[in-house]
Amino acid sequence: MTVRPILTAPDPRLQAISMDVETVDAEIRTLVEDMAQSMYAAEGIGLAAVQIGVAKRVIVIDLDQKEGKKNPRAFINPKIVWASDEMAVFEEGCLSVPEIWDDVERPARIRCEYLDGDGKKQTLEADGLLAICLQHEMDHLNGVLFIDHLSRLKKNMAVKKLAKAKKLQAVG
């Protein structure tokens, strides 16, 4: 298990479209473990493989992490097969967009099909934070950041703030 560095915007690798996983094998299970460790080290609740530079359709989510528990869940090749017409607004942040938080509107409930860490097909109906987190992480698999859902003005402000922080990091 290795903690891998998390890419931050505007790294162009975050715009990669992730490829389907053909087989859930030892390599994918190691990737899932590394992703979980990387997510915990960064104190996040979700991470997509592309955020550590691996353009594969793999997500790790652990909402229990907020309470100091560890219960990571792997979602391999996830697909939303249904989304409610009802929308919900949540304040989102992202490990790849540090220090930026803003409201994003998404479907309040979804049904998702995916493979678990053993390669078994699963279906999950989710609402609340889990639904939002799944949609946020699935966006990453398609090269979309949460700031891409913001108005042009808010997105430009976020990008400028990130660029300034990177410059300060490079100098310091």
Image (spheres, rainbow, N blue to C red):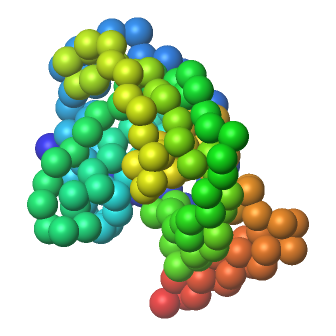
Residue 19 higher or lower than 71, as above or below: above
The one of 55 and 83 positioned closer to us in this rendering? 83
Q: Can residue 15 be seen?
A: no
Q: Residue at x 12, y 60 (%)?
A: 69
Number of numbered discs overlaid on the protein picture: 0
Residue 34 higher or lower than 168, as above or below: above
Q: Residue at x 42, y 40 (%)?
A: 126
Give coordinates of residue 28: x percent, y percent.
28, 24
Q: Is residue 109 left or right of residue 27?
A: right
Residue 172 higher or lower than 111, as above or below: below
Q: Which quarter of the picture shows residue 34?
A: top left
Q: Is residue 164 left or right of residue 43?
A: right
The one of 26 and 127 positioned closer to us in this rendering? 127
Quadrant into which the N terminus falls: top left
Residue 169 higher or lower than 109, as above or below: below
Q: Which quarter of the picture shows residue 73?
A: top left
Q: Is residue 79 left or right of residue 46?
A: right
